[in-house]
Amino acid sequence: MRPHVLALALPLVLATPFAAHAQMRTVENLQPLLIEAVRLGDAEGILGGRAKEFMAQTFGAHAPIVIKVRRVRPIQPAGCARVEVTTTQEQVAEPKTHTPAPGEPTHNPPTDQRLVYEIDFCENGRVPAEGGGRL
């Protein structure tokens, strides 16, 4: 590859992960993503609002909180499904589980975090009455 072509392409390659996040919609909570995944099969977004502020204050992480939801399988009653939720955030500094000694940091070193779980949910915005939205 010619050096000038590489110089032009490199910024595009490096910006790709950030551009992908910029195109996702921001949601205040999980509910709209859960409903969309039940209806359409998958959904994704960036968590914003008070939940994002809480996470930033608690863990000192300011990177986007990316949420991806996919329908695993339909369940009864009609309009409900088992969905898988994957939440990721880069550079999360979790608080230590013990009381730190004087001068010791109160948080562990930052690491990328990922949480995956499943839940039953319905397109009406509620958990199914039977099964109670079991995890």
Image: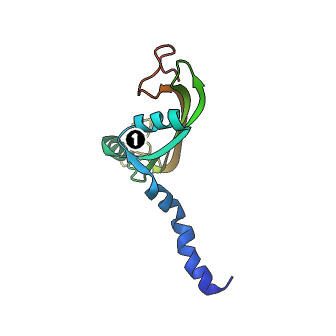
For the N terminus, give its image quadrant: bottom right
**Vertical arrangement, residue 87 with respect to residue 62, above or below:** above
Q: Residues within 10 Å of mark 1 (few under 14, many from 20)?
A: few
Q: Amino acid at mark 1?
A: Pro
Q: Residue 4 appears in which quarter of the rendering? A: bottom right
Colouring of the image: rainbow
**Vertical arrangement, residue 28 with respect to residue 133, above or below:** below
Q: Which is nearer the eye, 32 or 113? A: 32
Q: Is residue 64 visible?
A: yes
At 38% from the left and 38% from the top, the residue drawn is 29
Q: Which is nearer the eye, 46 or 129? A: 129
User: In the image, residue 120 lies at what x, y percent?
Assistant: 52, 24
At 48% from the left and 26% from the top, the residue drawn is 121
Q: Which is nearer the eye, 6 or 107? A: 6
Q: Furthest-right residue in view?
A: 1
At 54% from the left and 27% from the top, the residue drawn is 81
At 51% from the left and 25% from the top, the residue drawn is 79
Query: On the image, numbered disc 1 is attached to which residue?
Result: 100
User: In the image, residue 32 lies at what x, y percent?
Assistant: 41, 37
Q: Residue 102 appears in which quarter of the rendering? A: top left
